[in-house]
Amino acid sequence: MSVVDNETIERDRKHVWHHLSQHSVLTSQDPMIMVKGEGSRVWDIKGNSYLDASAGGVWCVNVGYGRTSIGDAIRDQVCKINFFASTAGTIPGAIFAEKLISKMPGMSRVYYASSGSEANEKAFKIVRQISHKKYGGKKYKILYRERDYHGSTIATLSATGQEERRDQYGPFVPGFVEFPHCCEYRSQFGDVDNYGELAALELEKAILREGADTVGAVILEPITAGGGVITPPEGYWPKIMEICKKYNVLLHIDEVVCGLGRTGEWFGYQHYGIKPDIVTLAKGVASSYAAISCTVTTEAVFNEFLGESSDKDVYFRDISTYAGCTGGPAAAIENMRIIEDEDLVTNSAVMGKYLLEGLDRLKEKFDIIGDVRGKGLLLGIELVSDRQAKTPVPEQVAAKVAGMCMQKGLIIGRTNRSFEKFNNTLCLCPVLTLNQTEADFILSTLDAVFTELPA
Ligand SMILES: Cc1ncc(COP(=O)(O)O)c(C=O)c1O
């Protein structure tokens, strides 16, 4: 039997401040400390092994754990040159940008940083600067959708449609305006045939209410992830694109979760024929072997910043130190090679369909499951206490289910203190190498947990 490393546990308990965690709990229970990963499995410091259906807890580790070739790529690169400020270029930065753009027809330029929040902040600054350059500062507002999440900084929280996440962090940045969600299961319009169109028209209403000449952009997740895995209803995206075009509003797609094969296409927006002006990426870009994010724009957006070198107001006056770390793009190149060579985008689509069919069967068996939805390996299970009334279960029930899964060796995610009413969705987001045996384990574990769940 392996000896538990109590020294590390105590060091952690004393000095590390865990994210999204109430530390008083850790006086009576040990902090979880992860020590190893291989494929879709992780091991904690006590030797427990889990199938990780959360890709690292926050939908990141797309190509799975233990990829020594990514480690080698990072090592080789940082031993040559680890860093130079991103005012200059680097070899892996140039190679990855070209590879990325080859997967994103219509897009043209890659602006590096190191987190999803930062990538979104860059996009906001681009929109604001264009507003100043072209519209006298007037077209500065950025619309965002109820239930979407865009990051943890004050500006990205200002653009986040999750009230519990925002609670106590205001006042927020002016100029960010919310419009209603598009979750058909929670339709605001009753039982209608054209839900997608009606939900999209909420964007138009918001633009008209604010004044089209004041709205610079809208930020949207192609499929809402942490807000409850909300797949867009039929007819939604064509209408959204039509509205953006009509009112000259830039379309910013946040692919921080959906990007890099997660949903069974290279990028989530590619399911829906969306033509974005800005796309932001992080998490899966290097499967979190290194911290890298990208704000990708069209050439038209980039061209707004071209001009005389003597003009201090024309170019994008932004920099983040760690955008110059070469380990990020080196890891991202190898990560993309793995996704291509192992055809993980297809695997995501195939295994995602298999899991979704399994979840549909669970829904028939257990009344607590109100809705299952998702695309590729991004799936959600919405729990209700009354199917007819669609009453959401309290957050403790979703937490209990996740805790029981954990005890059976399965890590799943859930909407976590995000909403006043809707912290009732379990999230599945396994690594993209998932095989059928592993998918069956996810399904049989959920089956066992719902069977054992106290009434
Ligand atoms: C859709 C989306 N956008 C942005 C972010 C923020 O990314 P980061 O935590 O890397 O700042 C997240 C994080 O979960 C996310 O889910």
Image (cartoon, rainbow, N blue to C red):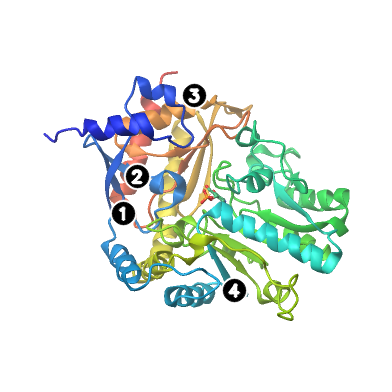
Q: Does ligand 1 reach within 8 Å of label 1's beta carbon?
A: no
In three-dimensional space, the C-alpha distance between marks 4 and 1, rounded to whole angstroms, equals: 30 Å
Of mark 1 and mark 3, the one earlier in the sequence is 1
**Mark 2 neighbour class, 10 Å CA radius: few under 14, some 14 to 19, many 20 or more:** many
Q: Residues within 10 Å of mark 1 (few under 14, many from 20)?
A: many
In space, the residues marked 1 and 3 are separated at their CA atoms by 30 Å
Alpha carbon separation for disc pair 4 and 3:
44 Å
Mark 2 vs mark 4, CA separation in Å = 34 Å
**Residue receiving disc 1:** 65
Say which of 429 and 351 sits in front.
429
> Mark 3 falls on what kind of element?
helix
Of tags 2 and 1, the one toward the viewer is: 1
Of mark 4 and mark 1, the one earlier in the sequence is 1
x, y percentage for residue 23? 43, 26
Residue topped by disc 3: 396
**Residue denoted by label 4:** 109
Q: Which residue occupies 45% across, 18% down?
A: 455
**In contact (CB < 8 Å): disc 4 and disc 3:** no
Mark 2 / mark 4, whichever is N-terminal: 2
**Is 338 drawn above or below residue 211 in the view shown?**
below
Q: Residue 286's image quarter? A: bottom left
